[in-house]
Amino acid sequence: MLTELSIENLAVIGSARLELVPGLNVITGETGAGKTILAHAITLLLGTRVDNGLIRPGAAEASVEAVFSMPPGFFSTVADSIDVPEDGQLIVRRRLSPDGPSRSYAGGHAVNSGVLGQLTGRCLRFSGQHEQRRLMLASNQLDMLDRFGGQELIDLREEFRLLFQRRVELASGLDNFAKDADAAAQEAELIKFQLIEIEAAAPVPGEDESLEAKRRRLVKARELEEAANQLAGILGAAPEETGVMEALAGAMARLEAAAGVDAELDNLLARLRAGFFELEETGRDARHYAESVELDPAALSAVEERLEVLAGLKRKYGGAIEKVLAYAAGCRERLSRISALQADHSSLEQDLRETGKEAVTLALKLRRLRQAAAARLEREATNHLRELDFPKSRLKVEFSFLEGGGKLTPAVLSSAGAEKAEFFADINPGMPPAPIRKAASGGELSRIMLAIKSAAPVAEAGTIVFDEIDAGIGGKTGLAVGAQLKKLARSSQIVCITHLPQIACFAEAHFVVSKTTTGFKTVTEVARLPEDEVIDELCRMMGSQPSNKKARAHAAELARKAAEN
């Protein structure tokens, strides 16, 4: 429960500290005194957006701090890093700065406003006109029914929500596959065609250069043969040719005959011998080369055709045979990825079918729990409605099921399950039950909200704050609402901001918000009333002076009736 609430420099409140009791805490005050600021302070602790205009003029910052007393381990599922002392007290704080973002703290640690809201939202629930308007929406009525159903239903709904989200992601993935399927198939066909073309040609690195050299030889074959034969003939290596080698042989014989006489002539002989043998070898090589020259037009045609094939590959796939081969390797890798994607597609389809079956099973289980919870809620909320001056009214939960053709399929499921729920009430005697969004006025809606919360105190947080629960009611109905709030306060701590004395008289702790103006300065203060001043405040709330005997007697009668409940 909420044991302390402290406010500093928030709008007209300079400083206020409320020590709250476990039962029914009532906050009253003149219109404009600052009750709304108190309500806003509580919502700040729930992580709502900050309006820096609420900081008191001249103040460096504003802050709201609360002390919650809860069982140890109560907050561990929300934030493991939050340290809750053994006594179960958790201190949370929200600081507002005029020139920067707000800062939030919990258990001595800085947290973001989202974590702060999760922590405080587990032990405090705020019920104002906004929540009453939310009650009119069917989707919120289903949420309220699930909370009433207890932890098993809440856990099952979360399990279903996560599974539904998984199905959405799977379906989205399949949609993306479907959009790309045609393009991927066309790409695969093109890649296969290109691979067949490259692999059929089977190019080898350096092959084009070798073939180009061969082509040049084939084109010049006749010229090469004639040049080699001419050389061979000159050197006497060609058949029936004598050439210069015979003359050189005669000269070398003359020199050898004169060898040993003159060293200079011997040197010339040595040089001639070396050149003679080299020329003789050259002649033989020239003859062999001439004999090896290929004079084959068919071979030339084959080489040119092969070069054209390789040139076509290079034009298409990279400009060089090495790049063509690299392109082919890339094609094989891309085909492998496309194949893997197709396998993933099959796996996604299987996962989608399996999660669909599981979702239907969970949805049906969720439906059974909701129907059981609805029966209990109808019974208990109807009893509370009659306590709240609706003697012949009853609450009914109407379900609309999502399946079509009498069969539940994954395609019709929503993130909340397989049904919608709407609250009906027969508030006006003689009229059939109607949706509360159509049948209930503001005051009636407040009482319906209270009846539902009274039916499910265990499902609510440890502290419930009611702001404007008294809108549109008064007199006898106000007493009924006050009595119900006191009854609800036996299981949950209640903080009620009200202007009705018929509700305030039930308070176990009565706080008064008062505003004073001195010069140009307005100050709002909050103080708990001593028991001997409660009657005075009830008189003021009735629009009378505490000295008015009739008003005082009426106030005392209200206090007596409240004490009897």
Image (cartoon, rainbow, N blue to C red):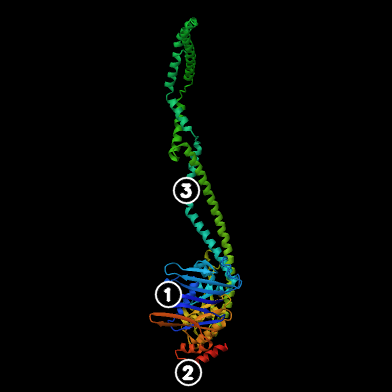
Gap between marks 3 and 2, in whole Å? 93 Å
Residue contact at pointers 3 and 1, CB within 8 angstroms: no
Question: Residue tagged by mark 2?
Answer: 550
Percent across and percent down for residue 184 are: 48, 50
Q: Is residue 71 above or below residue 324?
A: below
View extreme (left): residue: 520
Residue contact at pointers 2 and 1, CB within 8 angstroms: no
Q: Which mark is residue 186?
A: 3
Q: Amino acid at mark 3?
A: Gln
Q: Where, quadrant-wise, is the C terminus in this rendering? A: bottom right
Mark 2 or mark 1, whichever is nearer to me: 1
Tell me which label, 3 or 1, sits earlier in the chain.
1
Q: Nearer the viewer, residue 445 or 240?
A: 445
Q: Which mark is residue 56?
A: 1
Residue occupying the point 58% across, 60% down: 354
Q: Amino acid at mark 1?
A: Arg
